[in-house]
Structure formats: structure tokens, C-alpha cells
């Protein structure tokens, strides 16, 4: 799909300060000089085609419950099986294969530290592989969204 | 953060509905007033429980195919000041200090970079190295080759 100027503004301009008013789409429409129906229509297209993952609150890490970045060195032949086992835990919300000796990287989020450690211990016990725990110690990021580049879209 | 706040957060995780009065729809689901929903979202934003309310772009879909986790071994003493400098670079989306695990993992600074080409990613990594200068004692870049799971709360 070709992105129109309206699509681009909707993608770029509302990565923060999405209106907190009774009629946010009308507010956006007024700001962009279009109608509310056009805004809702364009957002619906962007969501339908997965250009927007969602509209809602972005929360800092560890704000709700406890989270942990973890890494494992998994033999190539076992990677699929191990990844499938890990993904079955509802506490795992990201899991990536990366090019490194530590080739499996996941984020676990739980209600509290005890639950988090239970999940990690269960993964180690079942796979027989060590889980390297890399908890967040300091957050240096001031999150204002991301200036989008429209080349190669 | 109380139980009502938690229920609001869960209700918004699926995404704000695309109707004229989306907060009214949430309010009806939760059995509270829409003014209360908006006030509580504003309060949570003010005290940092919510970082921002956003239409969140899917960077991968927009052509950002080179998403590298850059990791650096930075001297402990200057890491706070340097971490904030790296976190402010426009192409960095997350910047955290994490523990080293010697000998196998010497890196204590993590910064995610996002680029559309390999050359652009390489330039971003050089820029971080410039910021760290003599305090950069080693680095690595881990590109994701496969997303195996991505779900749940949005953070970062």
C-alpha cells in the first residue's frame, strides 16, 4: 500500500501525546486539517496492515511486575525445541534468535521476582542449559518516540 | 497504582478502539466514568507509570530491517553520564545498564539501534563508539535473525 501524507503524519506525529480527550480522533483531525472519519479510516488501514502495532499506553520496564532479559547458548539442532518450550510460558513476552554464541534472547515478565526465578529455574531444569540473567540496572533512555524515515518503506 | 489503574492498563493493552469516543468505550467496559478513565491515565503518565500514550509504529514494517542490539564494555565510573548521551542519540530506542557476567559476558551497556541498511547501522555503531571514546573497552552487535515470540505488555 502507498502511504499517503495523512498516513505518514499519523505514524510520525502521535508517538507521544496521543490526545487524552473525549474525542481524540476528532482532535487529531483538526490538527491535520481532515475529518474524523478520515483519521479513523486511515488508522484502521494502518493497523490492518500492521504499520501501527497498537494505539495505547507505553510503559517503562519493571513498572508492572518484575522483568528479566535472559540469554542462552543453545546448540543449533535444539534451537527450535528449546524456543518452543520457552514460548509456552505466558511470562515470556519476547523471544529472539540472534547471531551470537548466546543465540537465544528472551524477556520474562512476572508478577514478582519469585515467580520470575521459578520460570527461569524451570527452563534451566528442563533444557539442561544455563540461563544468563541480565536484569536492568539503570535506564538511560528518555523515550520521545522515533523520527521516522520514509525511504525504503 | 491501585486495582482500577491496573484494570485500565489491561483494557488498553489490546489497543484503543477506533470509534469517536474510545475512552467512553473503555469506561463502559470497566464500569466507571470516562472522565475517571482519562484522569487516571493522565495521573499515571504524570507519575511515570505510563511513559507515553501513542500510536506505536511497527518499525520493522516501515523498513527498519537492521535492528541491532549493541553491547559495550564501559568503565563503571563514567557509565551514567555516557549512558544518557547514548540514550539521546536519535536512532537509539532503548539504552540500559545491565550486569557483566565475566568471563563470558563483559558488556554492561546495551543500546538498541534501528536502521534500514547495513551501512546505516554501521554508521550508527561508529557514532556510539565516538560518544564512548576511550571508555569503550570492547563491543559487539547482535542482530536478530528470527522473532520467535512477541506479545504482552509494551514497554521500553
Image (spheres, coloured by chain):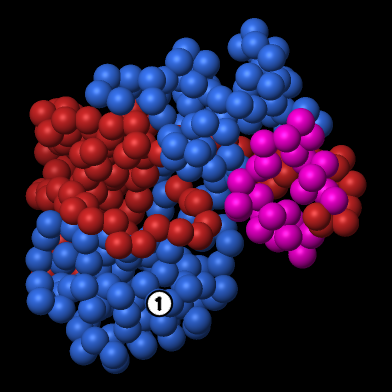
Residue B144 is inside the magenta segment: no
Q: Is residue A104 left or right of residue B56?
A: left
Q: Is residue A110 visible?
A: yes
Q: Secondary structure at mark 1?
A: loop
Give the magenta range. Answer: B1-28
Q: Is residue B80 visible?
A: no
- The color chain B is rendered in: red
Name the residue tied to disc 1. Answer: A88
- The color chain A is rendered in: blue
Residue A108 locus on image (x, y percent): 42, 69
Using the image, name the chain to which the residue with label 1 belongs.
A
Residue drawn at the location 50% of the way across and 51% of the way down: B154
Residue drawn at the location 37% of the way across and 44% of the way down: B94
Identify whether B23 is placed above or below A18: below
Q: Is residue B12 left or right of residue A80?
A: right
Q: Is residue B139 left or right of residue B69?
A: left
Q: Is residue A32 left or right of residue A89?
A: right
Amino acid at each position: 500500500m502507498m502511504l499517503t501524507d495523512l498516513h505518514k503524519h499519523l505514524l510520525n506525529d502521535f508517538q507521544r501525546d496521543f490526545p487524552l480527550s473525549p474525542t481524540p480522533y476528532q482532535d487529531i483531525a483538526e490538527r491535520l486539517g481532515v475529518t474524523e472519519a478520515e483519521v479513523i479510516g486511515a488508522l484502521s488501514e494502518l493497523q490492518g496492515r500492521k504499520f501501527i502495532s497498537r494505539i495505547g499506553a507505553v510503559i517503562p520496564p519493571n513498572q508492572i511486575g518484575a522483568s528479566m532479559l535472559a540469554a542462552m547458548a543453545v546448540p543449533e539442532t535444539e534451537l527450535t525445541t528449546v524456543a518452543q518450550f520457552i514460548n509456552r510460558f505466558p511470562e515470556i513476552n519476547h523471544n529472539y534468535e540472534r547471531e551470537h554464541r548466546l543465540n537465544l534472547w528472551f524477556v520474562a515478565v512476572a508478577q514478582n521476582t519469585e515467580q520470575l526465578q521459578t520460570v527461569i529455574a524451570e527452563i534451566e531444569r528442563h533444557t539442561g542449559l544455563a540461563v544468563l540473567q541480565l536484569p536492568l540496572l539503570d535506564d538511560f533512555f528518555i523515550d520521545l518516540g522515533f523520527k521516522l524515515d520514509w525511504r525504503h518503506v | 497504582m491501585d486495582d482500577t489503574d491496573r484494570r485500565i492498563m489491561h483494557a488498553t493493552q489490546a489497543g484503543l478502539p477506533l470509534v469517536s469516543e474510545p475512552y467512553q468505550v473503555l469506561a463502559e467496559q470497566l464500569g466507571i466514568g470516562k472522565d475517571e478513565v482519562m484522569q487516571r491515565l493522565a495521573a499515571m503518565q504524570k507519575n511515570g507509570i505510563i511513559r507515553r500514550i501513542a500510536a506505536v509504529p511497527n518499525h520493522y514494517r516501515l523498513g527498519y530491517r537492521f535492528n541491532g542490539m549493541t553491547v559495550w564494555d564501559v568503565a563503571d565510573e563514567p557509565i551514567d553520564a555516557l549512558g544518557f548521551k547514548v540514550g539521546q542519540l536519535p536512532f537509539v530506542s532503548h539504552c540500559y545498564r545491565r550486569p557483566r557476567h565475566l568471563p563470558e559476558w563483559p558488556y554492561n551497556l546495551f543500546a538498541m539501534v534501528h536502521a534500514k541498511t547495513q551501512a546505516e547501522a554501521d554508521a550508527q555503531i561508529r557514532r556510539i563508539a565516538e560518544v564512548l571514546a576511550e571508555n569503550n573497552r570492547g563491543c559487539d552487535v547482535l542482530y536478530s535473525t528470527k522473532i520467535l515470540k512477541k506479545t504482552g505488555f509494551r514497554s521500553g
